[in-house]
Image (cartoon, rainbow, N blue to C red):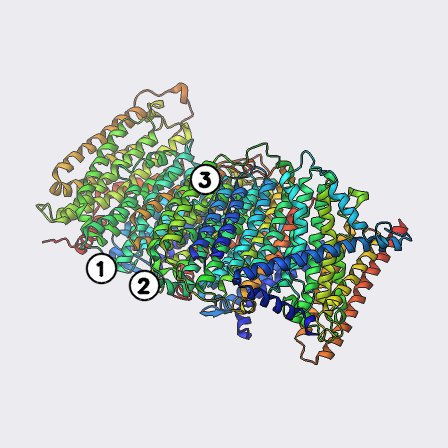
Amino acid sequence: MVLKVVFLLISLFTVGSAFMVVTHRNLFSSALFLVASFFGVAALYVLLEATFLAVAQVLIYVGAIATLIVFAIMLTRGMMSGRTSPRNDQAVWAGLSSVVLGLVLLYVVVYRVRWPVVEKPVPPDTIERLGSALVGPYVIPFEIASVLLLAALIGAVLIAREREI
Amino acid sequence: MAFFDRWVLTIILFWPLLASIWVLMLPKEKEDQIRRVSIWMSVVPLVLSALLFVDYGARFLPRGGGIHYDVQVTWIPQLRASYHIGADALSVPLIFLTALLTTLSLYYSARVIKHRVKEYFFLFLLLETGMFGVFMALDLVLFYVFWEVGLVPMFFLIGIWGHENRMYASLKFFLYTLVGSVAMLLAFLALYFHAGTFDIVQLAEKRPFADDIFKASLVFFGIFLGLAIKVPSWPFHTWLPDAHTEAPTAGSVILAGILLKLGAYGFLRILLPILPTAFAYWGFLMVILGVISIVYGAFVCMAQTDLKRLIAYSSVSHMGYVMLGLGAAGVALSGKVVPLSPDSAALAMDGAMLQMFNHGIITGALFFLVGILYERAHTRDLTAFGGLSGKLPYYYGIFMVAGFASLGLPGLAGFWSEFFVFRGAFDIVRVWAAIGVIGVVVTAGYILWRIVANVFLGEFNEERWGDKLWDMEGYEKATLWPLVLIMFILGLYPTPLVNFFNQAAVELLTKAGFMFH
Amino acid sequence: MFDTSTFIRLLPELILLVTALVVIFVDLYARRRTALGLLPGLSIVGLALSFLAVFAQWGTREVVAQTLAADTFAAFFKMVAAVAVILVVLASVRYMRARTRYVGEFYAFLLVATLAVYIAVSARDLITLYLGLETLSIVSYVLTGFLRDDKRSNEAAIKYFLYGAVASAIMLYGFSLLYGVTGTTDLQEIARRLLNGDVLVNMEWLAWPAIVLVTVGFAFKASLVPFHQWAPDAYEGAPTPVTMFLSTVSKATGFAVMARMFLVAMPALQSSWTALLYGLAVLTMTLGNLIALRQTSVKRMLAYSSIAHAGFILMGLVAVTTALGQPFNGLDGVLMYVVAYAFTNAGAFAVVAAVEDGTGGATLDHFAGLVGRAPFLAAAMLIFLLSLAGVPPLAGFAAKLFVFAPVVRQEYYVLAVVALINAVLAAGYYLKVVKQMFFVEEPERAPFAVARSMRWALWLMIIAVFGVGIFMNWFAFMASQGAAGMLGL
Amino acid sequence: MNFLDPRILGEGWNHFLNSLGLSSGWIVLINGLVVTLILLGLGLTSVLFAVWLERKVAARVQDRLGPNRVGPYGLVQTVADALKLLTKEDITPDNAERISYNLAPGLAVFAVLMLLVVIPFGPGLVGADIDVGVLYIVAMGSVGIMAILMAGWSSNNKYALLGGFRAVAQLLSYEIPMILAMSVPVLFAGTMKMGELVERQAGFRWFGVVMPAAFFLYFLAALAENERTPFDLLEADSEIVAGYHIEYSAMKFAWFFLAFFLNTLILSAIATTLFLGGWRGPFVEQVPILGIFYFLAKSFVLVFAFMWIRATFPRLRIDQMMAFAWKVMVPTGLVLVLVAAVFAKLPVAPVVRDGLLFLVNIIILLVVAGFVGRHLRLQITRLSEA
Amino acid sequence: MVPLSWYLTVAALLFVLGLYGVLSRRNAVAILMGVELMLNAVNINLIAFWRYTRPDNVAGLVFAIIVLTVAAAEAAVGLALFIALYRLRETVNVDEIDLLKG
């Protein structure tokens, strides 16, 4: 019961923030709401007993991605004044199609499909398992991820670098 | 002899390709050398194909024809597609025709073409390989490959060395043909899936779709579209006037002389043997299309003021005879109409094949003649001329021979083919054949009234032409004489050729299940 | 679990990775002039070695490190990718040198992108598959926007990036549903659990959303309509060698993962995805061709044409039969098309790059009278265009044959007719370029020279285009082995 | 002496709550509140003391007296200052971005306070010993950056924005060597739990002693993370007049001030936990409550070091600072991680291993110092030539 | 315990909101934010499925971690591109970048 209430509060916070992210006129505020939403998601992970993921969520989404986004917003600040509409001319269509897609998804995913749910506790050594999985069966993705990060790092530096004279 | 049997077709087929590569290697400044190389190289297949003609006639024709000189090498084993070529009584004369017209065209072009010489001769030789390939292929994939190979050089010949509207015409030519050929490819694939092979001989034995007329018709029309566009039969003919008109002289000659035959050849080589039921079922449609082509083509000729366009439309009309002959044979094959004489079907088909050969010779000659005039006058407008008979007597004479051959004057080549077609068709589809005869009358009309009266008779426009028009030169005579000679020979003594074609027709009809009593 | 044999199986990937690192280090420490000469050579050597390593393992069919499949299907795509990237490197030597200082990074990125392709085509696990695709995408964004001071390059990269990010997010959502319903990320395992209907009730309700969502991601990579909007812009704006890469290797990868995903993981839902792909194929080729007809920039025209070709390739998947041993099963059509198309399209774009180098642009006007100015380029372009149009005996014909065939076999008449019309439409605009090059004469424009490496690349591609067309049997053999060897089937 | 063992105290407390007849949910809630209050109290009191200490230390270094009027030795001075700040007028600039402007100071404090949760002050004395404690610390660190960015942006002030930029550049850059340094003990101990990390440093085998290079690296990075001289570029008064909090006054400024000192304390506390054996010390096994004093003592030694350095060194230039992070600290960190990973798996006796490790660390330190020194000499020569 | 479908609902809502953001925003950075929301939705799905269907198999968690990693790399490259764009054109509005058309 308590969990359900907590869940509802967190989800309300998360989804509400997400709503503000996509509707707020001011981009910087949008970004802040995004951070809030990320925190909400992290909290959901805690409810799901995925502590590691919750922390990683904060570390990567808030610490890296959101910071990058805010940074980018600051660097391109001339555009953030909000004088022009933040929405493009297909906003209405976007809204309609999103609503339709949402209804379809909810109907199918939540209502129609019966998921193979099992009631099992999370094993206490989940983090160890996760660690060994990353260097065991999933070692290839793990290694490729490192290559990807390196490539993205070099690529981002290369592209965003100041122009040479 | 074994060596000859095994290699002659392959050599004929790839010799022009080798020649074209040789031409490609030559520096483009050495135009004379390019011309010499091309002409002399093209003589080789001509000689070989003449030998082939004689050899086949002497050795195999008396002994019941059939496919000979065949070579089969596995090409795509997974698909059971092979490099399978061969020649029979139908293709041997056509191979000769191809070699002959190509050599003449090259010879003529050597004098006329002065612009981008290297490319011209390269493409022309490539084209020859494509045409040979179609006449020799006994495998559908191979057939398709050569079918398309012939397409590209012609596109360039029209597009680069053509007249004012060449770009439009070349594009139209290419796209029309492509529509048909892709449809044909799809139909080939359907055949493959039903019979498990691309080999034409095997397919003819297996008779795919013999019991399913719906699917057979579907496949039939796939192939039919490709062939009928090439022939071209009304209503698929609209590319032809443009292409013929805009093409350079030699291009028109080849286009009308041989490329159109590829379509008709396909009817005989693929549709009739492999899908006899569908061929018989839709024979009547072919008759109708043929007759419409004849009559429509002829009447449109009457309305032309452009000399070359007129000849082009006359091709539509004349290829209509081929369609009529084939269709009549098909109707006979279906058994719905029982002809008085079972030979009528073979006769109609003989006529169709003869017409293919003759039209090649005659229209080739006519296009050369038009080209010769155009070289001097730089206009193709009929009404601009008049009274040329006095000024260019030699030209007039040759033109008259070709023209009369075209309208089917007895004693010249054209007569026999028309005679055979109508003789056969009358027995099978009387009414339609009768309507078709209108076309013959109109043909006489446009040859005599439109061309002869306008161009050669009347008053010579001294003011405009003065001494700008002169009579035929040596090389032009040399180009035309062989054709004129053949017209006379075939007009007076067509028997050797008729023997060939009759053998082919009987063979094809028998295999297709036609009963000769 | 990491024994020697695993390393040997991973040798092609390792070679690429090491080469990429070597390239970066050489670029860091060698003098600029030495590096410029050395780097493309190094990259090509690495790619060639990796190609050989793949080839040496042809015919294997086993699981490597649990998440990769070392099968002929993957090997086929890897070889195509390696060869195509070699050509890209050859075509980019002069092009990139003239436009950017970061040549070393460029080649390193190309190598990493190839590595990503290797991973993606052999992934047999949702996670690896996603990561492979995404690595390829991200590196491609960088490559597209590599000329960062060029507005067009940047714009192209941004459009590519935005579409790509969204598409991959949507695809991921589909993946997550698949994971939810089967509880596993292993493709074969997914297939097994999907077939065992007892896992869940109402699976058919999930089939459509999952398939549609998943397809979005693949369709984006393969630039299928309506997920193609990025493609023309990215192809036009990207450095032309990168366009070569995107339009051949990257696209092929999209098809490879699509085929593996659908055939290995979702055979139970075949009727659903076939229907979806059917529609996509029709849309893709028709729209691609119709829009291509209106283009005046050759680069953009080729971009739309490559969209249309994606529709043709898709026909192979639509009409796929699970009897992968037989010829014309559809999947071998995809493979054939990918090979033929890789050489042909890479060739066409390489010519565009050369023309850009020589004339400063790539509109139809820049191609006018090309035959007089760079006859070799004109001839090469002609061959590539004819191959694209499917004229025998060129590679494109072999490709067309192998994708038309399954459609005819399955008796999809509408699709066949649509394909026919499209083949003709496509020929229409290819001929437009031919017309410009050969029929129009521009005697007053000066001839220009072609870089030596570019000449090499073009010759290779011309030979390949003829080779695939004439020695179709050999490639068909490889393709059918590749198709039949897909692990899990 | 059992009553001095906090673990037993905790049990007794729980027992007491149980005896009141409360349900388990309530107990969790009450315990949470109590822990929060204790941590808050501890944190804030320490800050008051730390501020006083800083001023005293700075004064001593600069040969002054420092605060000496309010209370004995000026001890209450900080309280007075705090009261002053709280009563000042709270100003919000006209064009400020209200929400983030007001949120930023709170968030800054929040980010630091959250860290208190995982720090083990004594045996069993930890708010929540979560599995991924070290990772949690890193994650929360990034929230602090967010707060600074918000402040810098929302003030609508050029200097504030520049300060924000610098903050992100500096903090992000130095976060990487810091994480690397932190992962050395983690690797060695094989756990990310703060409590266990302390357990693994039994018997004076402190990680900071065994691996001085890692400790030194952490310390330097912490200096930068804490925006302390010589890395205080983001508020450098002479350049950008206080940086991101230029527009803040009164209460909100106090929040930043609080966050700053809290950060000093907590970075020291983390260093203590990771490298100096946490609450370990003589007789702790017997008298667990001693652990708290050991812990605080060690932490304040580090805090003192922070202050000493601040008072002594001049400020770096921004390019020097960035170069130092990326060209010196990150590579060193990578090497250290590698070394630690190798040694952790080395099949030799712990003593031998620790000895070797120590040696290697010293060598690394010397080599790096040598490199830096050479570079500096080169620069100096170049400057003098020019 | 909270039912699985609640989590799925939250995820679906986040996903759709993200999609709306992507489709309706003009600013490239805002579009990227929408994408991040969608990725978060995916991760909620993954972790919820992990928790509710196979808590003893960490595949879902691994997947989520990989998604996080990729998201970071993607954001880095994307934002670098945006910054380059701003430098070149003084805009980051998607409908204002229109050199490539046709």
Query: Can you tell which mark lies on residue B70?
Result: none
State the SS at label 3. Answer: helix
Query: Which quadrant does the C terminus of chain A fall into?
Result: top right
Q: On the image, numbered disc 2 is attached to which residue?
A: B1
Q: Are marks 2 and 3 on the same chain?
A: no
Report x, y in % for residue D374: 84, 60
**Position in image of residue B367 (x %, y %):** 34, 36
Residue type marked 3: Gly
- Tell whether C231 sits left or right of B406: right
* Left or right of B278 in this view: B380: right
Q: Which mark is residue B206?
A: 1
First in sequence: mark 2 vs mark 1: 2
Q: Nearer the viewer, mark 2 or mark 3?
A: 3
View extreme (bottom): residue: D349
Residue D109 in view of the camera: yes
Residue D239 vs D222, above or below: the answer is: above
- The residue tagged 3 is A95
Q: Left or right: C27 with respect to C448? A: right
Amino acid type at mark 1: Lys
Taking the spot 55% from the left edge, 39% from the top edge, the residue there is A24
Tell me the CA gap for discs 3 and 1. 61 Å
What separation in Å lies between label 2 and label 3 (alpha carbons)? 82 Å
Q: Residues within 10 Å of mark 1 (few under 14, many from 20)?
A: some
The residue positioned farthest toward the front in the image shown: D20
Q: Would you place residue D161 above or below residue B295 in this image?
A: below
Quadrant of the image occupied by residue A152: bottom right
Query: Which of the two marks, 3 or 1, is nearer to us in this view?
Result: 3
- Residue D10 at x, y = what percent? 63, 67
State the residue in front, D213 or B507: D213
